[in-house]
Image (cartoon, rainbow, N blue to C red):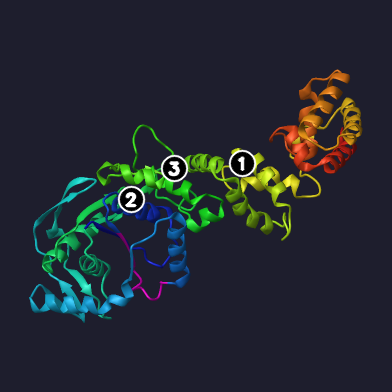
Amino acid sequence: MIRVRFAPSPTGYLHIGGTRTALFNWLFAKANQGQFVLRIEDTDKKRSDKKYLDEILDSLKWLGLNWDELYYQSERTSKYQELADTLLREGKAYQSEGAVILKMPKINLKIEDQIHGLIEFDTSVIKDQVLMKSDLSPTYNFACVVDDADLKISHVIRGDDHISNTPKQVIMYQALNFPVPKFAHLPLILGKDGGRLSKRTGATAISDYRRMGYLPEALVNYLMLVGWSPGENQEIVTLDSAIKKFSIKKVNKTAAVFNLEKLNWINNQYLKKVDTQRLTDLLIPILQEKKYLGDSFNRAWLEGIVKLYQPRLNTLHDFCNWADFLFIKKPKFTAEAKEKLSGNKLKEAFKLLVERLKGIEPFEMRAAEEVFRALVAELNLTAADLVHPCRAALTGKTVGPGLFETMVILGKEKTQERLRAAIKIIK
């Protein structure tokens, strides 16, 4: 049975690098009909915090990375002392100032890494390793080995930053006569500047990406492509299809760069295709937080707006940027939109348009367009001469969906009201 584990510490939030490690472990397990074990490494009582634990568990569930088994390292402490005592009795370890220390043999250690291939270590340059500290708590490496062996972990898939721990842990496995698992070290994710991922370059908690308006399936899709490819230049990959293609040996050996533009593009692809009802459900709390919506509102009207703007969204919050004019009394004009509102002819055109729109009943797109085009012809204008200033007057923006769709969503009264208001500010 293939068994892998993801072992976060609840001393901080779940970030992009850790999530990619969890994802590749999960994919490897599912691709091989194996099991994905979640182990919470919470032995650091001073720094561990329930808020971090809750965020880690919630984020993994939100991403769809459900685990088969869950363990807490803090509940396993008796096991570490028992095995340290065994190594003392066998003469493989010694005590110093209350700590139990493993004697490191001086050998040339070879490890076949599943991603990097053969890696050799000269253990003569590694000092003797503390197993149990004087306060009777285990060191990271010892607890890791004991837990992985006890939980029958077959493959340890983790970040490149753990390569230096690997020879120390292999020696511990051998000292305890435990089978050594296979190792696979994932290259790190770098910022666009080539340095370590920072908050500025994308090292943000998964819960922050959730708040920023990314869909879980889009975030998972993007992280799959950070160091692995399903082949044939495929960029939109669901978890189910990735399971059929995933191989740990096809993970890139070199570091990958985090690219926010690519994440935004992938999120846009998913937002375009997501069910409009689900998208509306996701947007309602965002709109209510901004006081754009109260507790009661016209659901059908809102879904109509969502459908109109759905193809343009990179994140959920883009909806508020695009469609804010529909939820506020007066549009917020961009500098470019203000520039569209100038010229004496425009005043006359707006006044006439307000009058002509009065007669449309019911207020529908085709009728609004017919009235508009007739007026344009009458005034000897091009459609563009009036479309762009109208959009600016109604929305405060220079880009958006079709003008007549916008008019209908806004409604006849508000359309007329905003055209009248614009007449007063036309230069």
Dot 3: what SS?
loop
Which residue is identified by label 1? 310
Label 2 with label 3: CB-CB less than 8 Å: no
| Quadrant, the C terminus | top right
Query: What percent of the width, then of the height, locates residue 383?
Result: 78, 23
Which residue range is magenta in the image? 36-48
Which residue is identified by label 3? 192
Question: Can you see residue 419?
Answer: yes
Query: What percent of the width, then of the height, locates residue 191?
Result: 43, 46
Q: CA distance from mark 2 to mark 1?
A: 30 Å
Dot 1: what SS?
helix
Three-letter code, disc 2: Leu
Three-letter code, disc 1: Gln
Query: What percent of the width, then of the height, locates residue 413?
Result: 86, 43
| Quadrant, the N terminus | bottom left
Three-letter code, disc 3: Lys
Which residue is identified by label 2? 27
Q: Crowdedness of circle 3 by 10 Å Cα count: few (<14), some, many (20+)?
A: some
Q: Quadrant of residue 423?
A: top right
- Nearer the N terminus, badge 2 or badge 1? 2
